[in-house]
Image: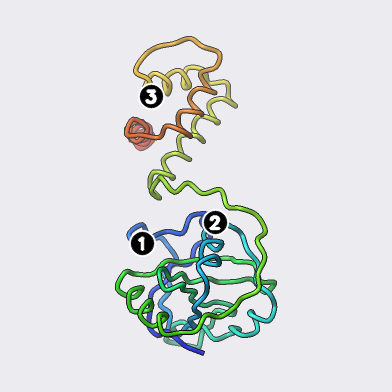
């Protein structure tokens, strides 16, 4: 088994794998002492990105307790984890004890380049797995934009549930720069935030969050 030593991972359960430039200080960043590396086919890498998958028990046994973290006081392991590479991309994956993918991580750019060079010289490892369901992924928005989109949708839903029509009208006017009395304002706004996300929504988020701070 081939191991990679001394790398940084950000294992998250987001639908979309976060690239290293999207990591932030509040993430659960792990300093990994040792982790096994496997070269796999591109289809598996694509499925890791786009689907919830489940690997078989044999593969779990092959990687059990081989991933070690840096810890000053004691030896600390991740029970089921590894690096998977198709020689074009590398992802770290942590599995549950029944084989489902729990967390995934991209790598820092320089570390990924080194691991890709290593995986070029490995034989491909066949891994038996099954796809459970497709992930609902938005590849077009950054992590921050996704946060803003979800914030606005939540604000809108709360206003709708509380029958705060004035708040909904305010949100509509800020988004579309006009006034309109329409029973469908809520649906129009939801559709616009979900499907036409732009700088106007970021500006609206800034307005709303500034007001919250002032309160």
Quarter of the image for the C terminus: give it.
top left
In the rendered image, the vertical position of residue 118 relative to residue 187, given as above or below: below
Task: Tell me the distance, in whole angstroms, between the alpha carbons under discs 2 and 3.
Answer: 32 Å
Residue sitting farthest toward the left: 110
Q: Earlier in the sequence, mark 2 or mark 3?
A: 2
Residue sitting farthest toward the top: 181
Colouring convention used in this rendered image of the protein: rainbow
The reply to whether the C-beta atoms of the residues labelled 1 and 2 are less than 8 Å apart is: no
Residue 207 rendering spot, x and y as whole percentages? 33, 31
Q: Would you identify the image quadrant in which residue 102 lies?
A: bottom right
Task: Tell me the distance, in whole angstroms, between the alpha carbons under discs 1 and 2.
Answer: 26 Å
Q: Give the number of the disc on residue 25.
A: 1
Q: Give the number of the disc on residue 50.
A: 2
Question: Which callout, 1 or 3, points to the residue nearer the camera?
Answer: 3
Q: Nearer the viewer, residue 34 or 70?
A: 34
Determine which residue is flagged by label 3: 175
The reply to whether the C-beta atoms of the residues labelled 2 and 3 are less than 8 Å apart is: no
Q: Earlier in the sequence, mark 1 or mark 2?
A: 1
Question: Which callout, 2 or 3, points to the residue nearer the camera?
Answer: 2
- Left/right of residue 141 with respect to residue 80 in the rendered view: left
Q: Earlier in the sequence, mark 1 or mark 3?
A: 1
Q: Give the number of the disc on residue 2.
A: none
Q: Secondary structure at mark 3?
A: helix
Residue 111 rendering spot, x and y as whole percentages? 34, 75
């Amino acid at each position: 088994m081939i191991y990679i030593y001394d790398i940084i991972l950000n294992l998250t359960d987001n639908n979309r794998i976060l690239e290293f430039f999207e990591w932030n200080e509040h993430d659960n960043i792990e300093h990994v002492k040792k982790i096994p590396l496997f070269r796999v086919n591109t289809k598996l890498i694509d499925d890791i990105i786009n689907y919830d998958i489940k690997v078989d028990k044999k593969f779990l046994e092959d990687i059990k307790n081989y991933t070690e973290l840096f810890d000053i006081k004691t030896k600390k392991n991740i029970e089921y984890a590894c690096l998977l590479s198709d020689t074009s991309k590398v992802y770290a994956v942590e599995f549950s004890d029944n084989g489902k993918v729990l967390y995934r991580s991209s790598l820092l750019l320089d570390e990924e380049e080194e691991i890709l060079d290593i995986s070029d010289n490995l034989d491909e490892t066949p891994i038996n797995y099954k796809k459970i369901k497709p992930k609902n992924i938005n590849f077009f928005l950054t992590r921050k934009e996704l946060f803003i989109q979800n914030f606005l949708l939540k604000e809108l839903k709360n206003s709708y549930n509380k029958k705060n029509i004035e708040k909904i009208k305010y949100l509509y006017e800020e988004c579309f720069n006009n006034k309109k009395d329409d029973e469908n304002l809520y649906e129009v706004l939801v559709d616009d935030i979900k499907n036409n996300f732009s700088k106007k929504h970021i500006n609206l988020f800034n307005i709303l969050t500034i007001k919250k701070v002032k309160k």
